[in-house]
Amino acid sequence: MKCTKSGKAVATNTIALDDGWGDNKRSYFIPIVVWEKQAESLANYTNKGSKIAVNGKLTSRSYETQDGQKRTVIEVVANQYGGIEFLDAKNNGGGVSSNQTSNNANAQQNRNNAQSDPFGNSSIDISDDSLPF
């Protein structure tokens, strides 16, 4: 992980994608770019061989090498929110997503709502005859 001059965290990595099987199996290596909090999470929770899912857009950029040659790179830039999902994170046997904190907060809110619902654990007996319409 690196930081830009303006202080934004950025991580570049390569993901391997296997397609097919047996003699028809091919491997592709796709460069990815991840920004800010997700870049920090990528650096902290993965190592070589970690399984991740990337949701982003395919982009191309050009640059010039030190010897003056022009190069073009095609890479996937991860979406800012939910662009990376960690399928097996280090120090954690299960998957961790970059928005896990908000998911935990939503689950707690749902539990609180269920506890405050006066009809949460009982059925409501309404017949068609008692409806006003």
Image (cartoon, helix red, strand yellow):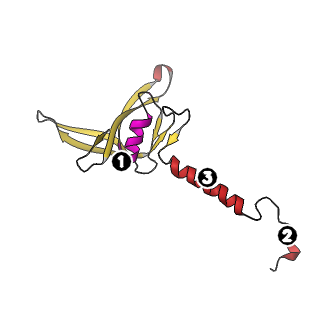
Task: Find numbered disc 3 in the image and state the secondary structure of the residue it sits on.
Answer: helix
Where residue 131 sits in the image (x, y, percent)? 83, 76
The mark nearer the N terminus, 3 or 1, is: 1
- Residue at the image point whose x is 45% and y is 28% from the top: 18
User: Label 2: which residue?
Assistant: 126
Count neighbours of disc 2 (C-alpha within 10 A) and say few if under 14, some if 14 to 19, many if 20 or more.
Answer: few
Q: Badge 3: few (under 14), some or many (20 or more) residues near its Cα, within 10 Å?
A: few
Residue at x-position 44% and y-position 46%:
83
Note whether 119 is above or below 77 in the view shown.
below
- The secondary structure type at the circle numbered 2 is loop
Residue 60 occupies which quadrant of the picture? top left
Q: Which residue is mark 1?
A: 36
Q: Amino acid at mark 1?
A: Glu
How far apart are the alpha carbons under marks 3 and 1? 25 Å
The residue nearer to you, when weighing 81 against 118, is 118
The chief SS type of the magenta part is helix
Magenta stretch?
A: 34-49
Residue named by callout 3 = 107
CB atoms at circles 1 and 2 under 8 Å apart? no
Quarter of the image with the C terminus in it: bottom right
Where residue 98 appears, as percent x and y from the top left, is 47, 45
